[in-house]
Image (cartoon, rainbow, N blue to C red):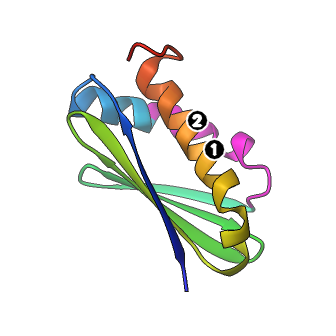
Amino acid sequence: MAQPVRFDIPHRLGRDEARRRMDKGLGDLDRAMPFASRIGKTWQGDRLVIEVTALGQVTTANLDVAEDRVSIELALPGLLGMFGEKIAGVFRKRTTELLTDGRTDA
């Protein structure tokens, strides 16, 4: 059974700009997750669905872009659950960087 991890990243960019930044900036996830054998990304409306294959298992990250936040939910099955904080940390760090330009004053 998948072990969900959920968190929000607040921003002041509006939905369109936040979505543009997510779309443009998450292209380097393969470098941030060298343990992954495959990373796939698709948009479903304002939801970016990212599938990461690692250790023979697939984890799904849903990034829901709203006017004032990006809500992230990770489903971490089996062995990947042991790496939940590391995987969540990659998404948290990268998303925060994209939404704040590396600044703390978003």
Q: Position of residue 79 (x, y in %)?
A: 73, 76
Could you give the CA–CA distance between mark 2 and mark 1, rounded to whole angstroms? 5 Å
Question: Which residue is more in the foreground, 50 or 94?
Answer: 94
Residue drawn 64% across the image and 61% down it = 84
- Mark 2 crowdedness (10 Å alpha carbons): few <14, some 14-19, many ≥20: few
Q: Are marks 2 and 1 in contact (CB under 8 Å)?
A: yes
Q: Is residue 39 magenta?
A: no
What secondary structure is marked by label 1?
helix
Task: Work out which residue is located at the far bottom of the displayed protein and give it.
Answer: 1
Q: Is residue 96 left or right of residue 83?
A: left
Camera-nearest residue between 43 and 69: 69
Q: Position of residue 1 (x, y in %)?
A: 55, 86
Q: Which residue is mark 1?
A: 90
Q: Residue at x 71, y 41 (%)?
A: 32
Residue depicted at x 70% and y 52% = 86
For the C terminus, which image quadrant? top left
What type is the residue that disc 1 sits on? Val
Tell me where the magenta segment starts and ends, as one range: 24-36
Query: Where is mark 2, residue-wise?
Result: 93
Where does the image place residue 73, in percent across and percent down from the top left?
43, 59
Around disc 1, counting alpha carbons within 10 Å, would you say few (fewer than 14), some (14 to 19), or many (20 or more)?
some
| Residue 57: image tag | none
Q: Tell me where residue 8 sits by quadrant.
A: top left
